[in-house]
Amino acid sequence: MAGKIRQLIDSIIDRKAKDNPMMERVIKAKMILKGINPAKYTDQSEDVPAVIAQLEGMMDSFGAASPSAAPAAAAGANARPGTGAASPSAAPAFQKNANARIKTAFSSNPFTPACIGEIRTQLAAVEPALVIFFASTKHAPAVISRQMQSAFPKAQVFGCSTAGEIATGCMLTDSVVAMAFSAEAAGNCKIEVVQNLAQRDDIEKACQNFEAHFGEPVAAMDPARYVGIVLIDGLAGAEEGFMESLGDLTNVNFIGGSAGDDLKFTNTQVYAQGKSYTSAAVLVLIKPGVKFSFIKTQSFRFLGKTLRVTKASETGREVMEFNDKPATQAYAEAIGVPIEEASNRFMRNPVGLVIQGEPYVRSPQQVKEGSMHFYCGVKEGMKLSLLESTDIISDTRNALAQAEKDLGGISAIIDFDCILRTLDLRQQNLTEDYGKLFAKIPTVGFSTYGEQYIGHINQTATMLVFG
């Protein structure tokens, strides 16, 4: 019968959003990233088995959630178009705690033991319960993970390799940056490692361990009280499916980045509890003792042109055709350049999947025989908007100002910043100016091979912001 897709969409939104407008936005965004645009379907729409199967999978994922557990508005789910800042609308009140401390450190010492010693000294004022760190591949993965855990034996320690590091007031290379949370700031937290990225069962097992630790189903957790961090192998090409599966299982926002390897593109690593992993992801679920929000900012404007994906290989992150033409030809025509110059415009003119007025950037990587290969997956049928880069510095400044206003002050930021943004800043000699934007805010971050927020995206800065 016709209209079943519309019924499933409405049922999912009703059961998961619980009349919460901000959660409804997030759920619709998840659907669009799956290639299902809720606005496209009506009660008369033809039933498409593949779409029905996807939606039924979403229904099954949260079937065990308590029907009485109505999640509050997601902190940061209501991103404001134009600024990228997000406010913790309807978030619960957090009590001020003088012992809730967050402190940052960094070292560019090439000798790993000395580097970690400098970081430990800088963090001496905090007895950390949780430590996150990002490290250049100048430091051997197994060594840096083991020694960071040894330096903070009472803390839960996790991190990943990078393509550049961000610290309070500066952008770095060949360094290690770290952020330490006191027990009062970290609240309750649990680290899980998923070693098989392609197996949904492994993601479900991690969520079951979260449930056992926190004592409630992940599908019922309040996204205004819980936040997740995800660090994932940046060369496995598995982010889209991983984030889809995770997003089906919980409404908690997981934010993070794909690990880098200093632009060598050979081996990226994630770290947890003294061990190093490749082809894996680290999931950290936190119930912080301080309020939090998110920033998602990308410095682009819409050009008023769209490219419909008519032939693609999602697993290969390849688009063969836009608008029923060879992809490179259609792209070149849209931006008004000869085909041979198309690849030179990728950084300046990526494309974006528009979700409720905001672009989720899909960055082209290279041209091969008329096809365009991307840094993240693109599905057939998607309609992508052509974008043009604007001012990264001013856009980020505005986003930080808005977040500070929303939270009533910022105590710390974890910044997951795309390597393409970093390369753009380097080309314009603006890395010093960008670093200065964070000069008054304790900050750590890294240049990623992709960002995670609701889904997998590119050329974006996604930030976890603490009040």
Image (cartoon, rainbow, N blue to C red):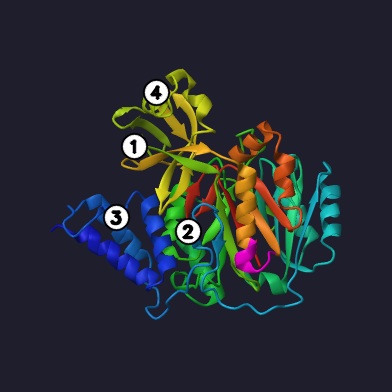
Marks 1/2: CA–CA distance: 30 Å
The residue wearing badge 2 is 203
Marks 4/3: CA–CA distance: 32 Å
Q: Which mark is residue 39?
A: 3
Identify the amino acid type marked 1: Val
Q: Which mark is residue 309?
A: 1
Residue 281 visible in the shown view = no
Identify the amino acid type marked 3: Ala
Q: Quadrant of residue 440?
A: bottom right
Marks 1/4: CA–CA distance: 14 Å
Name the element at disc 1.
strand
* First of labels 3, 1 by sequence position: 3
Pointers 1 and 2 in contact (CB under 8 A)?
no
* First of labels 4, 2 by sequence position: 2
How far across and how far down the image is residue 253, in percent? 51, 62
* Left or right of 234, for residue 427: right
The residue wearing badge 4 is 370
How far across and how far down the image is residue 19, in percent? 37, 73
Identify the amino acid type marked 4: Gly
Marks 4/2: CA–CA distance: 36 Å
Q: Nearer the viewer, mark 1 or mark 2?
A: 1
* First of labels 3, 2 by sequence position: 3
Q: Nearer the viewer, mark 4 or mark 3?
A: 3
The residue positioned 58% from the left and 56% from the top of the image is 295
Label 4: how many Cα within 10 Å (few below 14, some 14–19, many 20+): some
